[in-house]
Image: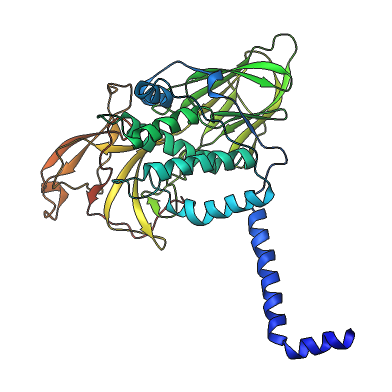
């Protein structure tokens, strides 16, 4: 047998090299999958039926869905996939989904989104969030729910397959807002609501008091466990748009430089002496008395985003975003362009659905070399969710390098 091995090595040296290469490639692939850590015990989502919301319209996706079809019910996720299936999910997300995510949280161009394919992406994000507790999947989930799915379901007209798919995604999404693990409570996104949560053998009431996605202040109050304090590891998601990662993928870049304002977190009005951020979640690990609350202040600046290729912004058009919401312009801006010096800002009055409306000016004559002499046109922008239409605005100003990571 030893002689035979030596003869084989002499006869097929290239095969031995190929075999070695394949083994090394498999090891590298396994290491890449392991880079996305899998939880030993997956998160348990709190069912949507346990959530009572206190507002409607743009601030609460489920009301938009039920207005379209009151019979819709949440579809729970299936069995927890094994490790091999988890590896395939991570590779598919990293290779086929993440690079293609658009501003609305779906796939395809913003002016012609692929609603059905995008709904599958949200299901995949929910699965990976359950398996990893990584906030980047919650970012994708929030963006898709509050923009593409909400906008599609709220669009005027008769029921279509796309509207039904979008409405179902909104109902399912409310069942992904909160999740539990051993001693931990995860708040994945913020909707004004009250939820009964069963955590480690006792009941807890979670009140989320907020005007998001219109305003950035959030109060998370824990109560319902009278008597002695409870030790809870409260994990509050810090949205990517609140910490400088305003774009959904490397295919986009945010304009503007300078320091990005950071979220502020307090407990019972006091600053925390120590804190920890794990996979995009601000973790508060302490004893909680019934009625204690955490206050989060999330920055809500209006951002201008461009398409990007090879690390450079693409000349031609910009889109507006504030918090998790992408904005679309009102009608009447054909032939206009956005000046590099123009700032869109929230107007004093809210819209019909309680949404923040942005106001600004465009220039009428794109051929005019100086903005100072080009006629200005006053325009308003509303969340895409309330009025689906094109989100891209012609802009002649081009900055060669993106200034913020996605």
Question: Which residue is outermost to the top?
Answer: 227
Left or right, residue 122 beside residue 363: right
The x and y percentages for residue 18 are 67, 78
Question: Which residue is depicted at the point 50% across and 19% down?
Answer: 193
* Front residue (pair 269, 284): 284
Residue occupying image coordinates x 47% and y 44% = 121
Q: Is residue 92 left or right of residue 180?
A: left
Relative to the observer, which residue lies in front, 248 or 403? 248
**Residue 305: x, y in percent?**
35, 48
- Above or below, 143 relative to 172: below
Q: Nearer the viewer, residue 8 or 193?
A: 8
Closest to the observer, 395 or 203: 203
Scheme of image coloration: rainbow
Which residue does the image show at 49% across and 30% down from the upper left? 172
Give the tally of numbered discs: 0
- Above or below, 326 against 366 in this view is above
On the rendered image, what quadrant is the N terminus found in? Answer: bottom right
Residue in view at x 53 percent, y 51 percent: 93
Q: Is residue 104 visible?
A: no
Residue 69, compared with residue 241, is above or below; it is: above
| Residue 17 in the image, given as x and y percentages of width and height | 70, 81
**Splitting the image into 4 quarters, where does residue 285 fall?**
top right
| In the image: residue 196, left or right of residue 111 | right
């Amino acid at each position: 047998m030893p002689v035979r091995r030596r003869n084989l090595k002499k006869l097929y040296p290239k095969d031995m090299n190929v075999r070695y290469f394949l083994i090394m490639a498999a090891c590298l692939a396994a290491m890449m999958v392991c880079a996305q850590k899998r939880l030993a015990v997956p998160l348990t989502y709190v069912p949507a039926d346990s959530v009572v919301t206190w507002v409607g319209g743009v601030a609460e996706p489920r009301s938009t869905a039920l207005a379209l079809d009151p019979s819709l019910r949440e579809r729970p996720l299936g069995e927890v996939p094994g490790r091999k299936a988890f590896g395939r999910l991570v590779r598919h997300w990293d290779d086929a989904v993440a690079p293609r995510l658009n501003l609305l949280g779906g796939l395809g161009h913003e002016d012609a989104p692929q609603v059905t394919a995008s709904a599958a992406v949200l299901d995949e994000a929910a699965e990976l969030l359950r398996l990893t507790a990584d906030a980047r999947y919650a970012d994708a989930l929030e963006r898709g729910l509050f923009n593409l799915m909400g906008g599609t379901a709220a669009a005027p007209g008769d029921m279509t397959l796309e509207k039904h798919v979008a409405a179902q995604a909104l109902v399912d999404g409310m069942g992904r807002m909160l999740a539990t693990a051993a001693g931990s409570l995860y708040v994945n996104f913020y909707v004004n609501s009250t939820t009964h949560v069963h955590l480690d053998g006792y009941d807890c009431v979670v009140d989320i008091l907020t005007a998001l996605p219109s305003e950035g202040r959030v109060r998370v109050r824990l109560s319902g466990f009278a008597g002695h304090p409870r030790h809870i590891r409260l994990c509050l998601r810090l949205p990517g748009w609140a910490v400088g990662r305003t774009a959904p993928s490397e295919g986009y870049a945010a304009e503007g430089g300078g320091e990005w304002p950071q979220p502020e977190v307090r407990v019972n009005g006091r600053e925390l002496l120590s804190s920890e951020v794990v996979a995009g979640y601000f973790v508060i690990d302490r004893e909680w008395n019934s009625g204690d609350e955490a206050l989060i202040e999330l920055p809500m600046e209006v951002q201008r985003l461009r398409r990007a290729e090879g690390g450079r912004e693409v000349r031609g058009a910009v889109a507006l975003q504030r918090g998790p919401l992408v904005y679309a312009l009102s009608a009447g801006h054909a032939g206009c362009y956005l000046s590099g010096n123009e700032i869109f800002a929230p107007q004093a009055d809210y819209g019909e659905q309680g949404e923040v409306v942005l106001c600004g000016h465009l220039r009428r004559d794109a051929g005019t070399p100086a903005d100072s002499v080009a006629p200005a046109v006053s325009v308003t922008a509303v969340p895409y969710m309330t009025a689906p239409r094109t989100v891209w605005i012609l802009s002649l100003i081009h900055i060669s390098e993106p200034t913020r990571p996605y």
